[in-house]
Image (cartoon, rainbow, N blue to C red):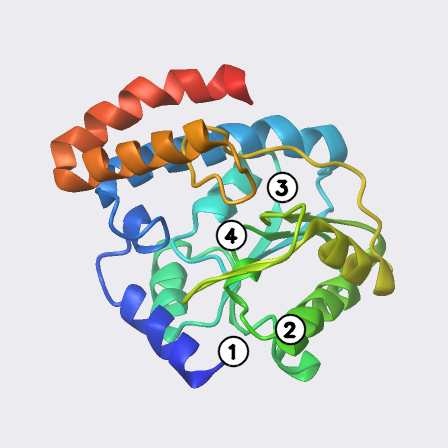
């Protein structure tokens, strides 16, 4: 990634390593904790339907950050789990908190010879790829992921998958489903399943429904005002999110 992007993530990971470092900036630690509770539930519910993680399976998590998904792969029974991050601060903290897990410092959009040695049976790239702003780097990331997988391996990724044209923000680009699927297929990856992570607890970037946008604007104003409101707001919305998914 660009030097600005690297500096941004080094700053993010210079703190205490809590989930709000890698979550939605400004919504507070409590509400981000509830958002990650939704992520955990969806990952543990959806991934085992498609990925059979035997004792010999080898897993790589991209952009491991705080180690959240490293722990979820272990929870699913994966034994050979490896992590990676482009941030030096993140990799140092991960090596301290997960001493039995190989942690690589690598940029998935970088040169292939700087990436971990494959192949892997499964790779996760959760809330990572939409932070790659430049189109050429994005395709290189997809190509690198495909090259790191075994022919029968699985890529587990989160993306916004817009129906229409892309939405460009200061720290992320939401691309169209058609563009992303075309890139995956160009590099030998065939989509097999799609499931939502959030319905009510994230920005409705791909919806024109004014009610959803008004709801999200109200919710973010409330939970960002005070940490206690983030805790209450998350506790109220969390059980509503589960049947929505």
Residue name at image x 54 percent, y 38 percent: 207
In space, the residues marked 3 and 4 are separated at their CA atoms by 21 Å
Instruction: Give the position of the C terminus as an image quadrant.
Output: top right
The circle drawn on residue 1 is 1
> Which residue bears the numbered disc 4?
127
- Looking at the image, residue 7 lies above or below residue 169: below
Q: Residue 57 at x, y = what percent?
A: 72, 47
User: Mark 3 or mark 2, which is nearer the start of the sequence?
Assistant: 3
Q: CA distance from mark 2 to mark 3?
A: 33 Å
Mark 2 near mark 3, Cβ–Cβ under 8 Å?
Answer: no
Reading the chain from its start, which is encountered first: label 1 or label 2? Answer: 1
Number of the front mark, 1 or 3? 1
Which dot marks residue 50? none
Distance Cα–Cα, label 1 vs label 3: 29 Å
Count of marks overlaid on the render: 4
Assess whether mark 1 and mark 4 are in contact (beta carbons under 8 angstroms). no
Q: Is residue 41 left or right of residue 79?
A: left
Q: Position of residue 140 (x, y in %)?
A: 69, 74
Residue 124, compared with residue 225, is above or below; it is below
Question: Front-most of 96 and 38?
Answer: 38
Q: Which mark is residue 135?
A: 2
**Which residue position is annotated with label 3?**
78
Can residue 200 be seen in the rendering of this structure? yes
Kind of element beneath mark 3: loop
Q: CA distance from mark 1 to mark 2?
A: 11 Å
CA gap between label 4 and label 1 equals: 15 Å
Numbered disc 2: secondary structure: helix
For mark 1, give the secondary structure.
loop
């Amino acid at each position: 990634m660009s030097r600005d992007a690297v500096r941004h993530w080094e700053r993010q990971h210079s703190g205490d390593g809590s989930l709000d470092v890698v979550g939605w900036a400004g919504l507070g630690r409590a509400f981000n904790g509830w958002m990650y509770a939704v992520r955990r539930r969806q990952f543990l519910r959806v991934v085992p339907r498609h990925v059979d993680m035997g004792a010999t399976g080898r897993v790589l998590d991209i952009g491991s950050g705080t180690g959240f998904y490293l722990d979820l792969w272990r929870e699913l029974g994966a034994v050979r789990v490896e992590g990676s991050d482009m941030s030096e601060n993140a990799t140092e903290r991960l090596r301290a908190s997960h001493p039995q897990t190989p942690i690589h410092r690598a940029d998935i959009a970088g040169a292939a010879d700087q990436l971990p040695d494959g192949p892997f049976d499964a790779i996760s790239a959760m809330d990572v790829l939409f932070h790659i702003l430049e189109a050429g780097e994005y395709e290189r990331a997809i190509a690198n992921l495909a090259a790191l997988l075994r022919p029968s391996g699985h890529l587990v990724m989160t993306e916004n998958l817009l129906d229409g044209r892309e939405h460009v923000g200061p720290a992320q680009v939401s691309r169209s489903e058609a563009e992303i699927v075309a890139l995956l297929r160009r590099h030998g990856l065939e989509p097999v399943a799609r499931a939502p992570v959030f319905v009510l607890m994230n920005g409705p970037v791909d919806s024109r429904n004014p009610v959803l946008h008004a709801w999200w604007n109200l919710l973010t104003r409330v939970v960002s005002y005070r940490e206690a409101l983030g805790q209450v707001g998350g506790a109220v919305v969390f059980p509503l999110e589960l049947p929505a998914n």
